Image (cartoon, rainbow, N blue to C red):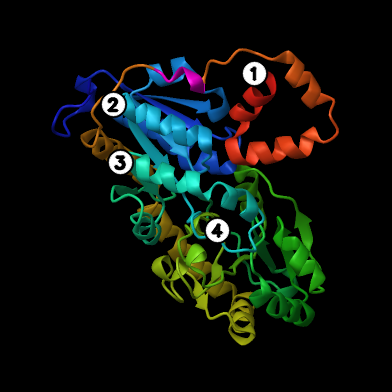
Amino acid sequence: MSYFMTTEMSQLDTPPAKIICLAPTLDSSLFDLRLRRPLERCANQFNYDVSFVLLSDCVEETIHSGDFFIVQRDANQFLSEAIALIKRMGKVVIFEIDDLLTELPDFLGHHKFLIDNKNYLQQSLIDSTLITTTTARLAGELKKYNQNVEVVPNCAGCHSVELRNHFDVTPSNVSVIVASSDRVLVDMVTKPIYDIQQKYHIQVIAIGPISTALSKAGIKIKEYDIMPYDDFLNLARSVDNLIGVIPLDSSLFSSCKSPIKYFDYSLSGVPTVASKVAPYVDFIEHEKTGLLVKNTDSEWFGAIQKLVLSYNLRQEISANAQTFVKSNYHLDVCSSAWNQAILKANKLRPDMVSNSIDSSLFHIKPNYARLSSYLFSATSYKKAFKFYRKYGVLRLVKFALFR
């Protein structure tokens, strides 16, 4: 049964559709940014009933109770089989993915884990009713697997600060922030930042794995571990005379990334210097809403120096960038994009083949002896980790506890 009329009429006239999001974790910044915040807003605006469930907690009742299923990013055998099952029951599956995980560069920390599951990811993309992703570039690449792709841009909450945090100060009172959530290539900025620091004694804030490369280059840093999304925003908004530095390589994977860090800096009153590569060339207007530089020592040094020495330029770029992001990437934009994706997916709803659950996915008799042998075997942990990487948490537990 469909809960929608054939036209995009007011959904207040129909019972709220039940949307279930199956995610590998419910406490990550990515989950918060891509699913929880925008879908809660979407549910309020367009009369949906949305719930968020750990993939490892998915049971029979979960699948029976939902009309639409949104699965996030990571794929394994269990998820691939669950998608096929949901479709056989005539229900909609939307695969949400924010990176080109089918084309991974070697320098990423989670490279091996994702390579092991590449076949399951590809099959999940093919089998899903529709794919949602962050940019038009990434959407174009994902259409190799499924022609039904909708862009749901990353959007910020737009709780922006007043632009009073750039002052006419000496260069030593200016700070640069460089952040990453994984290992990234930063060779293009290490020498320029080192030279700028040696010349002007600027402060350098480094967040995440990128800190190691900066320290090895001799740069004095104020180091932070990876932090929750709101903590990152609060940090960016709390430092006066701050400049955001976003280095990026020119790989296909990187070109399909979302410019969310640029959005965050812009809303925090932080002017950005970014590599002159996609996606930043698609979003930043050079010398108006940010500075774009080729990945050469001289261009990086010159751009950072220009902002260090001119608080007027920092203020001007900050104001323009904040206006651009608030006008085009407010959370309501993301909410509306999710609604359009759900409406389109409903039109693509598959025919029901069977209304019964494949019990082999959920019902297996327990074998406590096997669990005990796993808990007390010295070699079991390595095997368990490999099994987890291939099949996921739920299958790991069932393999140890059942059969």
Query: Few, some or many C-alpha atoms within 10 Å of disc 2 (few <14, some 14-19, many ≥20)?
Result: some
Horizontal side, residue 257 vs residue 401: left or right: left
Mark closer to the chain start, 4 or 3:
4
Mark closer to the chain start, 4 or 2:
2
Query: Few, some or many C-alpha atoms within 10 Å of disc 4 (few <14, some 14-19, many ≥20)?
Result: many
Circle 4/circle 3 CB separation < 8 Å: no
Residue type beneath disc 3: Ala
Horizontal side, residue 247 vs residue 45: left or right: right
Question: SS of the residue at dot 4?
Answer: helix
Circle 3/circle 2 CB separation < 8 Å: no
For label 4, the residue is: 265
Mark closer to the chain start, 3 or 2:
2
Quadrant where the image shows the C terminus: top right
Residue type beneath disc 1: Phe
* Residue 12 in the image: above or below residue 237: above
Q: Gap in Å between the C-alphas at discs 4 and 3?
A: 28 Å
Q: Gap in Å between the C-alphas at discs 4 and 2?
A: 43 Å
Query: Few, some or many C-alpha atoms within 10 Å of disc 1 (few <14, some 14-19, many ≥20)?
Result: some
Q: Position of residue 51 (x, y in %)?
A: 45, 24
**Quarter of the view holding residue 398:** top right
* Residue 279 in the image: above or below residue 294: above
Q: Position of residue 96 (x, y in %)?
A: 43, 43
| Residue 359 is one of the magenta-drawn residues | yes
Of residues 90 and 380, the one drawn nearer to the viewer in this rendering: 380
Q: Gap in Å between the C-alphas at discs 3 and 2?
A: 18 Å
Q: Gap in Å between the C-alphas at discs 3 and 1?
A: 39 Å
For label 1, the residue is: 402
* Residue appearing at x 44%, y 75% in the figure: 286
